[in-house]
Amino acid sequence: MAPHVPGRWNDVVRAAGLVADDGAVRATVFAEMSALAARTGAINLGQGFPDVDGPAHVAEAAVAAIRAGRNQYPPGPGVPALRQAVAAHQGRHYGLDVDPETEVLVTVGATEALAAAVLALAGPGDEVVTLEPYYDSYAAVVAMAGATHVTVPLVRTDGAGYRLDAAAFRAAVGPRTRVVLLNTPHNPTGAVLDPAELEVVAAAAREHDVVVITDEVYEHLTYDDARHVPLATLPGMAERTLTVSSAGKTLSFTGWKVGWVTGPAALVDAVRAVKQYLTYVGSGPFQHAVADALTDDDGRTGAWMADLVASLERRRDLLCEGLVSAGFDVVVPQGTYFVVADGRPLGFDDGAELCARLPELAGVVGVPVSAFCRAGTPAAEEFRSAVRFTFVKQEDVLVEGVRRLGGMRPR
Ligand SMILES: *Cc1c(COP(=O)(O)O)cnc(C)c1O
């Protein structure tokens, strides 16, 4: 008999839905679907990373930083130039007043910022509220903290896409709630929460004295008239909000893992207390390159970002129109890299089953939205037949993907 491997990882894999009926631990759906794509030669519209690099001059800045010998441990809170660039960015884009000395912490991607924040602020007996569907690391870090994960479903509306269920949100936040972990622009639905929705979150947080951690990694990737509003800009919220973002999505350098968290000094201190014993520091030379890029987001880098957004908007339309022609029921996203498409009109009630068969049916790979839900919740039911596709792939890849999907027959 295999030895029992003790520890909290057992809770983590259970929370992430990775324990099979026979007790074995499965790979994540993202790994499984990417392996399926590689094995079958299908077009991978599952995992959301760009297939074109970010701006060449920013890559050159990283090379220059390495050549200039910036290769030892950077300061624990992050290199000063990057902390200043992040603070200036928050001021310039959102009117937020952030002190680069005490209110910014550089992390190993947004992922580490989110993990360190949850570990710092929640523990056994505490509840952490998130939207559902949720980014997969949320359930895992809540389990690492030993806290309880409470979810609030996003609901589909007539004409306005997926929206916050305000009544459900108010009901979910209570005396045990320690943290709300919010994500807007939202992966996977592409919803961008509007000021009225944000005020529902803010009111509940103020009433119950809750800290809100906001995952804003898609802050610059919004389309049409949608604009990202940081929760910290709402009345009374700067003092109780930790705002998390990173360079990965904004600059198309997801492998650099340069992230940051901003907020009141006492909360940032709490996150740093944990972060310094997770990784201490990371991504030294890349921090310098990202500092240059953020400082230049109204210059050459800003022009590159504007082109990226315009191009992503076109690619979103290409994919959405193709999915509709193929027979999917599509909610057009307001932001992010992703679109959620419902396979029910094609005769598929189960998105996981559809994704397992898509390579054979169409030569395309997607990710079932059930991977972003907890089994048995109202959201899991609502999103049962939904599939997430990414449009952060080159146009010719999307054209071919759409052509293939168009050949699918309803069953
Ligand atoms: C990609 C992604 C992250 C991870 O960001 P990193 O900076 O790569 O760690 C976090 N949250 C959401 C919603 C994402 O889509």
Image: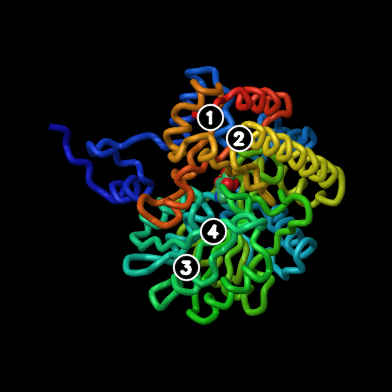
**Tag 2 near tag 3, CB within 8 Å:** no
Q: Quadrant of the N terminus?
A: top left
Q: Nearer the viewer, mark 1 or mark 3?
A: 1
Q: How is the image coloured?
A: rainbow
Q: Quadrant of residue 91?
A: bottom right
In the drawing, what numbered circle is on residue 410? 1
**Tag 4 near tag 3, CB within 8 Å:** no
Between disc 4 and disc 3, whose residue precedes? 4
SS assignment at label 4:
strand
Q: Nearer the viewer, residue 12 or 184?
A: 184
- In the rendered image, the vertical position of residue 52 relative to residue 89, given as above or below: above
**Tag 1 near tag 2, CB within 8 Å:** yes
Between disc 1 and disc 2, whose residue precedes? 2
- Real-space Cα distance between discs 2 and 3? 40 Å
Q: Which residue is mark 3?
A: 179
Count of labels in the image? 4
Q: For mark 3, does the 10 Å Cα neighbourhood hold few (<14), some (14 to 19), or many (20 or more) residues?
A: many
Can residue 397 be spotted in the picture?
yes
Q: For mark 1, does the 10 Å Cα neighbourhood hold few (<14), some (14 to 19), or many (20 or more) residues?
A: few
Between disc 4 and disc 1, whose residue precedes? 4
Q: Does residue 179 appear left or right of residue 260 in this picture?
A: left
Between disc 1 and disc 3, whose residue precedes? 3
Q: Nearer the viewer, mark 4 or mark 3?
A: 4
Between disc 2 and disc 3, whose residue precedes? 3
SS assignment at label 1:
loop
